């Protein structure tokens, strides 16, 4: 397999000398994958702990959400939370979950790179923004569906 692809021959040069040469995609991809595999072998433990700390986002968020929201009985007895109140609860819980995961990842990252302390607020903020967008997006989609489609008709008994 060739390591380069010749785009065109250069006029005025000896035959076989390329005017414009780029790495072959398959070779470039192969080298990139080799580097990735070597990096994973060297930092396999880091990758494992990074994945586990990222997976902690949901449990930490749900734990915080269970602590800041009122009980089902108290919500059922009253009018229930508004959309804005529910969104605020989600953002607060996501900020907590993102901070927990961000701190865990920062503890792993700080040994490899300097100036990574912004990782914690970036993770928390991005997770909170994603939760807010998902909450508002799902609400908007459901509203649109209910406005544009009738309820499913019930079968008629014969």
Image (cartoon, grey):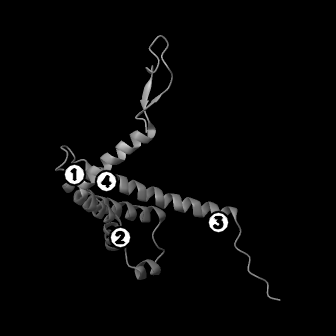
Q: Is residue 100 visible?
A: no
Q: CA distance from mark 4 to mark 1?
A: 13 Å
Number of the front mark, 4 or 3: 4
Q: Which mark is residue 109?
A: 1
> Taking 12 as reference, is 139 above or below it?
below
> Taking 62 as reference, is 100 above or below it?
above
Number of the front mark, 2 or 1: 1
Q: CA distance from mark 2 to mark 4?
A: 16 Å
Number of the front mark, 2 or 3: 2
Q: Secondary structure at mark 4?
A: helix
Label 3: few (<14), some or many (≥20) within 10 Å? few
> Which sits earlier in the primary sequence, circle 4 or circle 3?
4
Q: Quadrant of residue 20?
A: top left
The residue under label 4 is: 123
> Which sits earlier in the primary sequence, circle 2 or circle 1?
2
Q: Quadrant of residue 66?
A: bottom left
Q: Secondary structure at mark 2?
A: helix
- Decide if residue 24 is on the left or right side of residue 108: right
Q: Nearer the viewer, residue 39 or 112?
A: 39
Residue 29, position in %: x, y?
Answer: 40, 43
Q: Is residue 155 visible?
A: yes
Number of the front mark, 3 or 1: 1
The residue under label 2 is: 62
The residue under label 3 is: 146
Residue 113, position in %: x, y?
Answer: 20, 45
The residue located at (54%, 62%) in the rendering is 139
Q: Secondary structure at mark 3?
A: helix
Q: CA distance from mark 2 to mark 1?
A: 25 Å
Q: CA distance from mark 3 to mark 1?
A: 46 Å
The residue located at (38%, 65%) in the rendering is 89
């Amino acid at each position: 397999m060739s390591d380069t692809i010749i785009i065109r021959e250069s006029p005025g040069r000896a035959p076989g000398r390329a005017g414009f040469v780029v790495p072959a995609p398959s070779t470039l991809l192969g080298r990139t994958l080799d580097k990735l595999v070597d990096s994973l072998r060297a930092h396999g433990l880091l990758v494992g702990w990074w994945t586990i700390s990222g997976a902690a986002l949901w449990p930490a968020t749900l734990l915080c959400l269970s602590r800041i929201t009122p009980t089902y009985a108290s919500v059922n007895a009253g009018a229930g939370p508004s959309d804005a109140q529910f969104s605020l609860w989600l953002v607060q819980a996501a900020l907590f979950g993102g901070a927990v995961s961000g701190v865990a990842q920062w503890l792993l990252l700080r040994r490899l790179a300097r100036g990574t302390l912004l990782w914690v607020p970036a993770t928390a903020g991005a997770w909170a923004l994603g939760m807010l967008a998902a909450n508002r997006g799902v609400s908007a989609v459901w509203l649109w569906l209910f406005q544009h489609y009738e309820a499913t008709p019930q079968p008629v008994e014969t």
